[in-house]
Every structure is written in C-alpha cells, then in structure tokens.
Image (spheres, helix red, strand yellow):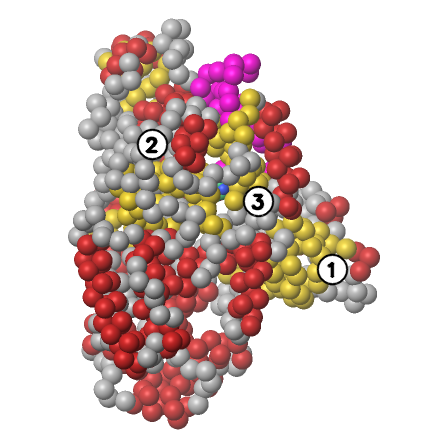
C-alpha cells in the first residue's frame, strides 16, 4: 500500500479526490459484505477506511459528499438498534450468598440425578464478571452478528460495535460452521479511570462504574465511538452450535480459548464442595488486584451430558450457580421517607439518602420494604435489628448486593438526633387519598383506590408497555406518564384509540385550555414541573403554550407534546404493530397481582384463546365447580394466583376496562408447546413406584419439556401411568379405569431416550 498523506497535510483538492475514492471503495466493500460474498477486505481494513474518511470529513466539512460512507443507509448509524431474536435463549443465574446455599446446590443436583453423596461430581469455578452479556454469532468462521442479552429472548443488534472490539476475533479458523459464543463485555479499572478523565475534560458526563461505562460504550449508535472505548471480553459459554465444542465445560472453554477468545485464567476444575469453596476464597482474595470488577464466582456442572439432563427452569439453568461476594455497606443520613404507590396499590417506603458510594455506585435511594420493617419488626411481629426502628434524621447503613435494589440494613442509635420522632406510616394513599389498608396476613399496606388512583393507573400503564408485555416502540415508561398527565391515555385501551382521537381533532380527552388550567392550578411545584415537562416545556408560560396549542398546522397530540407530525406518525405505526398480540403477552400485560410472565404463559397454553380464558373467569369466581377446578388443575397455578386473577377480572370496573382493551386487539392463539410432535404432548402422565434410571424430578421436568402434563394422582383424565417397582394403589386405580400403564423402559423408549 502506498504511503498515505497525513490528513493534516492534505490540500483541499487532494482531500476531495480521496473522499471520492474512499466512497467508492467503501461502497464496494459494503456490497461485497452485504451480499455475503467473501468480503474483499478485512474488517480491520474496512474500519481503517471508514476512520480515514471520517477524519478527512472532520477537517474538510464542506467537502463531505452527498454519498458520504458515514451517512449511507446500511452503514449509517440507525436511530435505534435493530432487534435480534436469540436462537437459544440467554438466561440468567441463580444467586447464592452463603456456603450453605452452595452445599444445597450440590445436594440438589445429586438428588435430581440420583447420585449418592460420594459419587464424583465436578464443577468448573470461574469469576463472575461484572459487565454485560453478549452473544456473538459466527457462520463459516465469520462474525455475522452480535447481540446484547435484552430480555433473554430478544436483544439488540450491536454487530457493528462489536466488530470494533479488538479482543473479539472477526474470523475463526477451524470453528464449527455455526457457533454462537457467549461471554461478558467489560471495561478494566485503568481504562475506566482514563475514560472518565476524558469525559470530564470534554465536559461530558462521568460514568458511575465500569459496568455502566461498558454498557454505554457498547450501546453507541456510532461504532466509531465504541472503537474509542477500550472494551474487553471474556468468553464463558455458547448458544447455538452446529457441532459440540467438547464433552465438558472445561474442554469447551479450552476450545474457545484455542479459537482465539479470551477465557478467564482463574477458571478451575473443582472436585466437590470443598474445592469449590476454596477456589471461591482464593478468587475473593485476588478480587482487588484483578484490574476489573467481578461480583462473585460461577459454578457449573462440568459434564455437558449432565448439564443437558439437568436442563433449565424458566429463566435459569439447574446446572449453574452464581456464588456472590458479600454485599457492600456504607453509612449515610436518612433525609426523608417517601411513599411510592405500585401498580397493585402497594405502598412502598423509599429512603431518600444523602448520596453515598456503596461498592463503586452512588446510592441516594434505598428500599425500606414496608411499615413493619421501619418499625423494627418482621412479618410475624418478632423484632429485627434488635427492635430498633428507623427515623428520618437517622444515620443508616445501606447495603447493596450485586444489581439488586439497595436496602437500608441498620441504624446507629448513638447518632440519632434528640428530636427524631417515630415514622408514622400513612393510612391513606398519598397519590389519591383513598384509604390504604392492610389485609390480614399481608405485610403490605395497599391503596384501595383501584382505577381512580393515578399512581396505580400510571404504574399499570408502565407495566402494560414494558418489555414482556406490549413493548411499544417509542412508548416507554416516561412517555406513558406524559400521556397520562395530559389525559391522552388513562387506561390501556386509550393507547389504541389514540390515532383516531387525534385525527378527530376536537375529541381529545383533555382540551388545551383544560391542560393550561390544570398547569396553573397545580399547587405542588413538583407536579407542575412534571406537567410542564410532559408538554416538552422547560418553564411554563401560558401565552407561549397557548400559542402552540392554537397552531393549526399540527394535530392536537403533536401540538400538545411539542412533537412533529412525523414523531406522532411513527408512534401510531408502532402502536398498530401491536394490535395483534400473543395471548400470553396480553395476560401478562394486564398487570394482575401474582400473574407474572411464567404464569401468563401457563394460562395462555391452557386456555388457548382469549375467549376461552375470559369466559372461564365468571364461573370460576364461585371458587368451586368445574371452571375453578380447571383453573387449579394448571400445574403452577395455586389458589392465591387463581383468586387474584378471578377477582381482578370479575371486578366490574376493571373488567370493563379490559373488555374495552380486548375490543381493540386481535389476540393470537397461544402457541402449542414447541414439542407438540412428541408422542406425549398434551397427555396427562402420572409416575408411580420407583424409577431407576432417573429421579422423579428429572422424569417430571423431561415429560413437561415434551409437552406432557404431569399429575400426582390417577383420574379418568390420566392418559398414561408410568409404573416402576413397588407401584401400589395408583397402578390398581389405573387398571380399574383402563388407563394405559407402562414401565420405566417403556417410557424411555416412548420419549426416544431408551
Ligand atoms: S454463565 C446460562 N458465567 O452473569 C447461564 N455468566 O447473573 C449463562 N456472567 O447473564 C451465564 N460472568 O451476563 C456465566 N463466568 C460467567 C459469568 C456470567 C458473568 C453474567 C452473565 C449472566 C449473568 C447472570
């Protein structure tokens, strides 16, 4: 390659000629790349061209071409990241803090696999890196895609940024044709300090800790910014694979190392609990000198065959455990106690603290759990913290473990001011004034305002648009709150009538004048500021707002929010995309107490359609009869969940709101379990007697993963009884009912495992 003239020495003429050459060259490389031909130039060379182009453009902004490679579609930084569905879900880890929990992990696995206490069972132990997880897909040895974890099922496409990370190979030699490498992106302590110094010098915001810096750097719309941030990577696992990497976790990691991925050098193979705990202690000792943040040690069953048998719970593998380091502590002043009202009406006390650094993170809010906790009692009325209560003005100890919400753990009575008074927990809702009551056996006081409580309504809406629920692009927690404050959206159904109401102009829920009146009428400064912010205003002046509202060229919604028509159109489009929604997402989105994502999925699979589901609620409300029994027959649905579900969907006002919503939607039928072609899918199976090849727990999990329903007792609904030696009354009953009965070998053969 000919010597390149340094950018500072280029004449304008030379610069123009070079920009033209670079535009052509980069366009050719893009074409070659995107058509999936073998690219003509390396990733590094491609990036060098892009960088030089950017440098020349920076020095000669006037010469920037209309077809500048920095601006082109496909190469241009997009406004948001595209979504990527993970071929294999990205899960999280179960946490443990105590030795006893690690012992229980080992014991549980032994029980599950029916291994004796003395049988060999090896684990790998490696540091838990405090960064963010990444999945990098290689096809034919070429890096084709990189994605963040996101919600585990769907992440963000950060391919272009990941290509700038030096520690991640762009090409692999001798790798399986399809290989998804998973690991942690992080930033080292020195690089973090240097980055913050640069940020400060540039008047930009400092990052709170290396993890945030790494996340912020990876999620840059402009890959050139990512390139300038020294991100690093450790591989610790894999997703989709066309050929196994090895028989054991350790061998697979070694293979990843041989392919060119950094693998943490503190990874050890441990034979049993004592070695695991010893290695944990050793890593903990080295923690401060590693040069990067870790927050614990991860243990994984080494034998990949056993990993496969152990399988997964809904969000975590049974074969791995994160043994976290003890939480970090700090003392600070409790300035105030605020009450937040949640979506189900729970009143949660929040401590407002003089900001303090706890384990590298600045903490200014912490949870105080509930009124008993503040008073120094547990849920049974027994003293905690030696019965010390917590008062505003106290010095309190703040505790932070990993990424969980910080808690107030203790109080220093020797520093309590003389005039501090016991905290009185409110008996009415601070948001709507309704009574807040505590039901028998509930540790939480709840607002009884239901739909009239603005705090509950806003929290419900936030939940409704959250990730696992409707997840509407451009309508996040902040936006629904704005829309609520301006009365555009008061309940979920309003989201779907937004476009029509806006088009109809005068039909807005709240007229501009009313908004202005409200703004002026707001007594609380905070409420006023929030309302003004919802209007996109820094300060509130009636005249200028009135002028904006009076403008005829925009529709009311755009005028209200100070938006362009284009933004409004984009939002309507994103909303339209969600008019058709899977049943489980809809059920989850309703935000009913005790009905999380897993329960919503169980309910959806059981009822299949929205009509079936909703029709079952009224008859189930009696808590007896077939509808109620049917609901309780769902494995994973107990009376507490069922009661909460039925109560909320038969409460007239709430039900009317749900019906208004459903009328706006096309609800997609629940997908049958992915394994519907298995011979036991949809069948009700009962296990009895002794199983010899696997434990009851494993047999049950396996059957369920194949789409079967496992029940504990034989009834006319039973399709199949698997009877081992010693089977008694159940086998007899099955015979009476004419239920097909097979032995364990027959079962294994049936499911293709024999
Ligand atoms: S294994 C199927 N190993 O911790 C589970 N995770 O709290 C795959 N993490 O999402 C995770 N270091 O981002 C694993 N050595 C390590 C890890 C590690 C950090 C992160 C990872 C995961 C999170 C769960």
Identify the residue at image location x=38%, y=55%.
164
Q: Is residue 81 left or right of residue 211?
A: left
Q: Is residue 562 above or below residue 340?
A: below
Q: Is residue 700 left or right of residue 606?
A: right
Secondary element at tag 2: loop
Q: Is residue 101 magenta?
A: yes
Residue 369, percent across and down?
59, 52
Secondary element at tag 1: strand
> Tag count in the figure?
3
Q: Which residue is mark 3?
A: 295
Q: Is mark 1 within 8 Å of ligand 1?
A: no
Along the viewing direction, whichever of 149 and 126 lies nearer the viewer: 126
Distance from Cα at disc 2 to Cα at disc 1: 51 Å
Question: Any mark on residue 633, and which?
Answer: 2
Q: Which residue is mark 1?
A: 395
- Position of the N terminus by quadrant: bottom left
Identify the residue at image location x=32%, y=24%.
703
Marks 1 and 3: CB-CB under 8 Å?
no
Distance from Cα at disc 1 to Cα at disc 3: 27 Å
Identify the residue at image location x=32%, y=12%.
744
Question: Any mark on residue 327, and which?
Answer: none
Marks 2 and 1: CB-CB under 8 Å?
no
- Decide: few, some or many residues near mark 2? Use Cα within 10 Å; few <14, some 14-19, many ≥20: some
Residue 743, percent across and down?
30, 10
Q: Residue furthest front?
A: 2
Span highlighted in magenta in the image: 94-123
Q: Earlier in the sequence, mark 3 or mark 2?
A: 3
């Amino acid at each position: 390659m000919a010597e390149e003239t340094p950018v500072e020495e280029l004449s304008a003429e030379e610069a123009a000629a070079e920009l033209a050459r670079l535009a052509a060259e980069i366009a050719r490389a893009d074409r070659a790349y995107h058509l999936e031909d073998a690219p003509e130039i390396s990733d590094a060379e491609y990036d060098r061209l892009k960088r030089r182009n950017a440098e020349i453009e920076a020095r000669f902004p006037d010469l920037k071409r209309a077809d500048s490679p920095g601006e082109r579609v496909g190469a241009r930084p997009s406004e948001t990241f595209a979504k990527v569905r993970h071929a294999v879900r990205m899960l999280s880890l179960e946490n443990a803090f105590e030795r006893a929990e690690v012992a229980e992990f080992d014991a549980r696995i032994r029980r599950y696999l029916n291994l004796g206490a003395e049988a060999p069972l090896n684990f790998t132990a490696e540091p838990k890196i405090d960064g963010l997880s990444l999945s990098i897909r290689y096809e034919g040895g070429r890096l084709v895609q990189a994605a963040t974890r996101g919600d585990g099922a769907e992440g963000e496409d950060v391919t272009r940024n990941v290509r700038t990370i030096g520690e991640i190979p762009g090409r692999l030699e001798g790798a399986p044709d399809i290989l998804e490498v998973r690991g942690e992106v992080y930033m080292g302590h020195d690089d973090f300090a240097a980055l913050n110094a640069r940020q400060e010098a540039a008047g930009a915001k400092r990052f709170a800790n290396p993890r945030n810096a790494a996340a912020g750097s990876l999620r840059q719309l402009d890959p050139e910014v990512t390139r300038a941030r020294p991100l690093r990577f450790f591989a610790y696992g894999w997703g989709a694979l066309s050929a196994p990497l090895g028989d054991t976790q350790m061998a697979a990691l070694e293979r990843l190392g041989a392919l060119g991925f950094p693998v943490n050098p503190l990874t050890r193979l441990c034979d049993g609990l004592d070695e695991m705990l010893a290695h944990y202690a050793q890593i903990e000792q080295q923690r401060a000198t590693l040069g990067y943040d870790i927050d614990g040690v991860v243990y994984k069953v080494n034998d990949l065959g056993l990993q496969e048998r152990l399988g997964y719970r809904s969000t975590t593998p049974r074969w791995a455990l994160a043994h976290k380091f003890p939480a970090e502590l700090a003392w600070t002043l409790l300035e105030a106690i605020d009450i937040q009202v949640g979506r189900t009406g729970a009143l949660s006390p929040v401590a407002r603290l003089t900001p303090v650094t706890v384990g590298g993170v600045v903490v200014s809010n912490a949870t105080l759990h509930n009124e008993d906790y503040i008073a120094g009692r547990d849920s049974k009325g027994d003293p905690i913290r030696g019965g010390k209560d917590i008062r505003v003005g106290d010095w309190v100890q703040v505790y932070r473990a990993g990424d969980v919400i910080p808690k107030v753990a203790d109080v220093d009575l020797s520093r309590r001011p003389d005039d501090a008074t016991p905290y009185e927990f409110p008996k009415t809702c601070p948001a709507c004034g309704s009574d807040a009551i505590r039901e028998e056996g509930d540790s939480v006081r709840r607002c009884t305002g239901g739909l009239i409580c603005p705090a509950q309504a806003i929290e419900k809406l936030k939940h409704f648009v959250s990730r696992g629920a409707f997840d509407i692009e451009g309508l996040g927690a902040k936006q629904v709150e704005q829309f609520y404050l301006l009365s555009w959206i008061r309940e979920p159904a309003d989201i779907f009538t937004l476009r029509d109401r806006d088009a109809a102009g005068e039909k807005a829920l709240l007229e501009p004048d009313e908004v202005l009146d409200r703004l002026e009428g707001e007594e609380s400064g905070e409420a006023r500021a929030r309302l003004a912010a919802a209007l996109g205003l820094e300060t509130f002046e009636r005249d200028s707002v009135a002028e904006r509202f009076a403008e005829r060229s925009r529709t009311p919604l755009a005028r209200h929010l100070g938006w362009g028509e284009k933004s409004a159109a984009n939002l309507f489009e994103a909303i339209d995309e969600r008019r058709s929604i899977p049943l489980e997402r809809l059920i989850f989105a309703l935000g009913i107490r005790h009905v999380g994502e897993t329960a919503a999925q169980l309910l959806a699979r059981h009822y299949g359609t929205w009509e079936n589901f909703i029709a079952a609620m009224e008859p189930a409300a009696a808590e007896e009869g077939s509808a109620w029994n049917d609901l309780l027959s769902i494995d994973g649905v107990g009376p507490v969940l069922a009661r909460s579900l039925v109560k909320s969907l038969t409460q007239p006002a709430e039900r009317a709101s749900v019906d208004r919503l459903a009328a706006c939607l096309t609800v997609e039928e629940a997908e049958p379990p992915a394994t519907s072609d298995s011979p036991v899918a949809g069948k009700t199976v009962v296990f009895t007697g002794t199983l010899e090849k696997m434990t009851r727990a494993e047999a049950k999990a396996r059957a369920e993963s194949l789409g079967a329903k496992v029940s504990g007792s034989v009834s006319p609904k039973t399709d199949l009884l698997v009877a081992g030696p010693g089977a008694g009354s159940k086998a007899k009953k099955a015979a009476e009912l004419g239920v097909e009965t097979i032995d364990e070998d027959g079962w294994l053969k049936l499911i293709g495992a024999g």
